[in-house]
Image: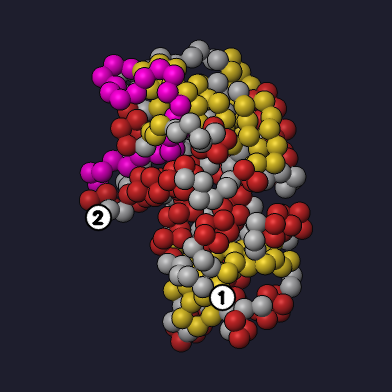
Amino acid sequence: MKVAVLYGKEKVRIEEREKPKPGKGEVLVKIKTALTCGTDLKVFLKGGHPRMIKPPSPFGHEFSGEIAEVGEEVEGWEKGMRVVAANSAPCFQCYHCRRGEYSLCEDLLFLNGAYAEYILIPERIVRYNLYSLPSNLSFEESAFLEPLSCVVHGVEEIGVSLGDTVLVLGSGPIGLLFLLLLKKKGARVIVVDKVEDRLRVAEKLGAETFHAEDREKILLSTPERRGADVVIEAVGLPETWEETLSYVRKGGRILLFGGCTPGTTFTLDTAKIHYGEVTVKGVFHHTPYHVIKALRLLTDKIISVRPLITHHMPLEELPQALEMVKEKKALKIAIHP
């Protein structure tokens, strides 16, 4: 099979490798669509990920496809079934899992290798995070399951109410997914970014938009100029984390969603947090509970993710696709092996 292999910083090769054979409890999926992702871009630029990928390694984690083979003792899954899988599964046994904190699992099993013709789904993910697709859900739409699950997790943790003013820093794919979900929850959404093309997309999807440099105008747009009820950081830079406090009202909530480089730090005004009673919350990844909710959002067509796919490319052009995402010339690129 053809597979994209990461060898280091911005070094990806399309290679021929032996198609894996599913073992006990495992399922082999023929990939129909894999999506580019901000995390994959970071992996590409940095040459790996401390928790998930050590090169040389296949990578990519947002995908959907058809079951090609099933291993021994696999029940409920058959060849030809249309499926989508989340990219991880908790152990359900460690300290955090016993407390229901599944995204903090001490033995969280990650799945990578979606930029390929086939991917082997481990037994634990088959058991807990593999889902069949209804006929009305396309492979392209269902491949959004993983990032949407993360966004569902973030929105539920920060607690957005009907009529809240929510300011989203960043209008990349994650920021736009937040926008789509927040609008359905009845929030007023303001999106801030530096890239005009992305702001235009956010505006078409129902957001009020501002360039990141227009700080005074952003505050003036909030109710009584007091700041937003909720501020969501969807960029993943320490300097953007610091900006969140500039836009939140007293008693408001900040969601630090974008992941920064390990070892980096940021500074917040202690007086604003203390005397302003501001809640600052970090959220990582997703849980099986949020995956199920995200799948329902997609299946029931509650939100439309198609506008976020700006290009379609074959697997052989993955290096070019990653460069396009790097240069912000694309939002999501659907890779079709």
Residue situated in front as seen by the camera: 137 or 36: 137
In which image quadrant can residue 310 be found?
top right
Tag 2's secondary structure?
A: loop
Q: Position of residue 137 (x, y in %)?
A: 51, 36
Q: Is residue 330 magenta?
A: no
User: Label 2: which residue?
Assistant: 99
Q: Visible in this render: residue 184?
A: yes
Q: Position of residue 181 (x, y in %)?
A: 52, 57
Q: Indicate the amino acid at tag 1.
A: Ala
Position of the C terminus, as image quadrant, is top right
Image vertical order of residue 155 relative to residue 313, above or below: below
Q: Residue at x 32, y 42 (%)?
A: 90
User: Label 1: which residue?
Assistant: 228
Q: Residue at x 56, y 53 (%)?
A: 177
Q: Residue at x 66, y 78 (%)?
A: 221
In which image quadrant can residue 91 be found?
top left
Position of the N terminus, as image quadrant, is top right
Magenta part of the chain: 71-94
